[in-house]
Image (cartoon, rainbow, N blue to C red):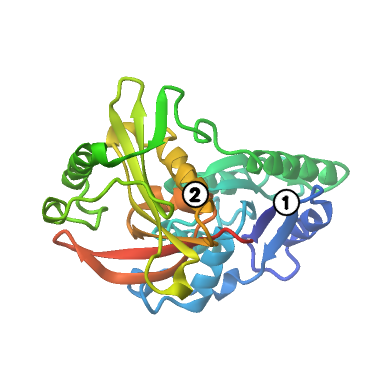
Amino acid sequence: MKILAICGSLQARSANRALIDLAVRLAPPGVEVVPFASLGDLPHFNPDLDGPACPEPVLRFRRAVADSDALLIVSPEYGHSLPGVLKNAIDWSIGSGEMEEKLIAITASTPIAVRGRLGLRALRDTLSAVKARLIGGEPVVRGAHEEADLQALLRTLAERAARPPAGTAAAPPDVHIAPLGPPEQAAYNDFLLAGIAAHPDTLRIARADVEQAPFSTAETPWAATLAARTAAGTWIGVVTVEREQGRQKRHHIAWIYRMYVAANHAGSGVGRALLRAAMERARTMSGVGKVNLTVAAHNRRAISLYMSEGFREFAREEDAFRDPAPRAELSMALNLEQ
């Protein structure tokens, strides 16, 4: 398990940086605390820079956040608030989604218990913008109980990171996920058309695409379309997983296609359960060692889900599709062989 530790102070001999150094030494068994030492390299946040030519320090920070299981932020209080360099880093991650619903422990190193609280409150408010799952929030007072208090925070953070968020590990008990067959092709395409009508900005396919060439639901050794349905038979989600069938040298890659959950079931765990079922199906496909997918760059809920299941961004395409507004799209991948 990897915990990324971020210090909100750039001061060379900062007490908060010293607390992170202590966290490295006190990490629980099986946990690695990795300090991020380049916060000062981030340029001032500017949306104009956030595109194909995004600065390398920003990409490095985003990758570090994405590749961690949880964050530990240790930050001083500056002017009754959080330091500007820390706020700047968070701003760089809001639009790209790396901190979305991330598990984050926050604290500060202080000489007495009443110090640092306004800064932590401001940090908590800022992180609410990304719906971060926060723990801690109390300063760690330097002195006799410093190690014990820090160990307790690290232990809680590691235990929380080791289990999925409540309510998201599986679909609701009255939901059944199963592969579809040819007799269900018409119902599948009708459900997909309803999704396109409701969310034209997140699904790259158009109504005309489905009407002119309906998607097949036939299950083969290298392809399957899964549907989530209630006990009453109501369709609430679908996903397709398919191994590449063209070039021989790409037969190790499977793709997730047309992942869609009805809006009234968003956040219920159906999407996660569908994704995990698709991944299990991919693992049964001969030779598959990697799974790719694409997702609209503004679909932060979906990106957060994919990242929490281990997918990582490897490309971004501007103006990938239009609805009619130009939409950017991310390509993400999960290596099954690691």
The x and y percentages for residue 183 are: 24, 37
Residue position for label 1: 109
Q: First in sequence: mark 2 or mark 1? A: 1
* Image vertical order of residue 186 relative to residue 331, above or below: above
Mark 1, other Cα within 10 Å: few <14 / some 14–19 / many ≥20: many
Disc 2 versus disc 1: nearer the observer: 2
Q: Amino acid at mark 2?
A: Met
Residue positioned 16% across, 58% down in the render: 323
Residue placed most toward the observer, 284 or 131: 284
The x and y percentages for residue 298 are: 32, 57
The residues tagged by marks 2 and 1 sit, at their Cα atoms, a distance apart of 43 Å
The answer to whether residue 114 is seen in the rendering is no
Q: Is residue 146 left or right of residue 122?
A: right
Residue extending furthest top?
232
The x and y percentages for residue 106 are: 63, 47
Residue placed most toward the observer, 216 or 112: 216
Residue position for label 2: 279
Secondary structure found at label 2: helix
Residue positioned 68% across, 43% down in the render: 157
The x and y percentages for residue 41 are: 56, 75
* Image vertical order of residue 315 relative to residue 235, above or below: below
Secondary structure found at label 1: strand
Q: Amino acid at mark 1?
A: Ser
* Mark seen at residue 260: none
Whether tag 2 and tag 1 are in contact, CB under 8 A, the answer is no
* Quadrant where the image shows the C terminus: bottom right
